[in-house]
Image (spheres, rainbow, N blue to C red):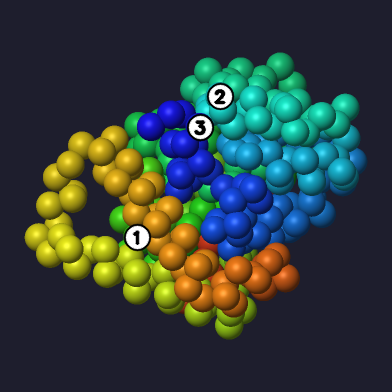
Amino acid sequence: MTPHILYTMSAERVDIDHPELSAFFFQQQAAYTFCMKYCKNKTVLEIGSGSGYGANRIADVATSVLCIDKDKTSIEKSKTIFQKKNIQFACTSIECFHPRQKFDVIISLQVIEHISPKHLDQYLRTIQKSLKPDGVCIFSTPNAPRSSYNENPYHFIEYSGDALRRILLKYFAKVKLYGVMGDAQVERFEDARKRRVFSFFSFDPFSLRKLFPRKIRQFLFDLASFANRKALNAQIAEFRSISEKNYRISPFNSNSAIDSIAVCRKPTAL
């Protein structure tokens, strides 16, 4: 398969160009809408900017936005589509990122679960060092009690709310948790998606998939997720109408939050 096809089918790269991914796109945009109130007239760093749509919205209210992502295709696409004067895109990994300035706000949505335990301290310390003393850092990540059934091979760790708070309190003095919640229509979508995932797993009753190399599991996961989403959108019309208005951000509740959002302040001494 060509890199373009692999990018299009990826379960981890979501944009508005693919209607079968619309629920996930708008779920993420709800988190960006939440972030925008912290970014007005601020210097912003986004770590893991993905398709760039969220960063482009942040740029509407921020003084400047620097976006980094390790995926070259995502960065090149973002540079082509989003050309505001106050937004920059750079292809780099967190391990190689050494900013020359400190930022008022740092956003890293749907990233921490992709960081291996070996690199987690470096990731969080880089954010610490890059944030102004009175700055705000915002993380989001799947809420493990709601998402771990999916066995996502791209994720090293999926965090419960309590686990996420414990980790972040090692680096920030104040951590407040929120959740991305869905309405009844979204919950029907989530339930249907979960049933289809278990249907896929029924073909592998001995969990032999877990023995495959990580790269193979990721490829199979992308194929299965793409087929799953296409089928749900084709078969059930109401899921195609899901938009950002179907999501809300509320104080964290482990049972109902699809994603966790952590707002962190006062980086601790390095």
Dot placed on the residue nearer the N-terminal end, 3 or 2: 3
> Disc 2 marks which amino acid?
Lys
Residue 171 horizontal side relative to residue 63, left or right: left
* Left or right of residue 95: residue 53: right
Q: Which mark is residue 240?
A: none
**Distance (Cα) linking label 1 and label 2:** 27 Å
Judging by the rendered image, the residue that carries numbered circle 3 is 4
Kindly identify the residue that appears in the image at 52 percent across and 67 percent down: 233
> What SS does tag 3 mark?
helix
Q: State how far apart marks 3 and 1 are (Cα).
A: 25 Å
Label 3 vs 1, first from the N-terminus: 3
Q: Nearer the viewer, residue 9 or 164?
A: 9
Foreground tag (3 vs 1): 3
Residue hosting label 1: 150
Which is in the foreground here, disc 3 or disc 2? 3
* Location of residue 150 in the rendering, given as x and y in whole percent from the top left corner: 35, 60
CA distance separating discs 3 and 2? 12 Å
Residue carrying label 2? 72
**Label 2 residue SS:** helix
Asked if the residues shown at circle 3 and circle 2 are in contact, with their CB atoms under 8 angstroms apart, the answer is: no
Q: Is residue 181 visible?
A: no
Left or right of residue 223: residue 95 = right
